[in-house]
Amino acid sequence: MTVDGEVRSETDPPTAPPPVPAPVSRATVLAYATVAVLLASWVLFGWLVQQQGLVDSLGEGLGAAFTLLLIVSVVGSVRQHRRD
């Protein structure tokens, strides 16, 4: 059997088009940009002002970023659970 120029077996189920992702709001993009600037500022502050070393400053910044990601994940899970 041919579908749109493709040869398919009779037992192959038809493929559905991939889902279209929801657009990201401007507020979300602005929040992500603000967090990125704050984290970069935190790293530079620790490195240049507090003189604590680049590796230590990057570690603090990455720790803060992962903590924020964990918080966002938990909040998203709770919100999804309440909708269901």
Image (cartoon, rainbow, N blue to C red):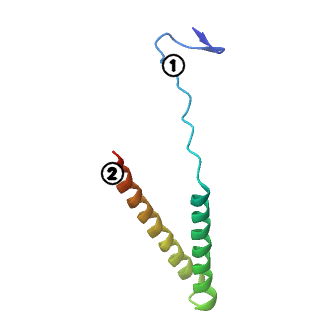
**83 and 32: which is toward the camera:** 83
Q: Residues within 10 Å of mark 2 (few under 14, many from 20)?
A: few
Please give the residue where the numbered disc 2 appears in the rendered image: 82
Point out the image quarter for the N terminus: top right
Residue 72 point in image, percent of width and height? 44, 62
In the image, farthest residue toward the bottom: 50
Looking at the rendering, which quadrant does residue 7 occupy? top right
Q: Amino acid at mark 1?
A: Pro
Residue at image position (56%, 42%) is 21
Q: Amino acid at mark 2?
A: Arg
User: 45 or 25, which lies in front?
Assistant: 25
Residue at 62% over, 72% down = 37
Please tell me whether residue 60 is drawn above or below residue 34 in the rendered image. below
Please say if 79 is above or below 19. Answer: below
Name which quarter of the figure residue 54 lies in.
bottom right
Give residue 69's position: percent from left, percent from top: 47, 64
Left or right, 77 with respect to 27, comes to left
Q: Secondary structure at mark 1?
A: loop
Number of marks: 2
Q: In front: mark 2 or mark 1?
A: 2
Distance from the alpha carbon under mark 2 to that under mark 1: 34 Å
Mark 1 nearby-residue class (10 Å; few <14, some 14–19, many ≥20): few
Q: Is residue 55 above or below residue 27?
A: below
Position of the C terminus by quadrant: top left
Earlier sequence position, callout 2 versus callout 1 = 1
Quadrant of the rendered image containing residue 70: bottom left
Estimate the x, y position of residue 68 in percent, counting from the top left: 47, 68
The residue shown at (60%, 10%) is: 2
The circle drawn on residue 14 is 1
Please say if the residues under marks 2 and 1 sit with CB atoms less than 8 Å apart. Answer: no
Report helix, strand or loop for mark 2: helix
Looking at the image, which residue is at 57% across and 69% down?
Answer: 35
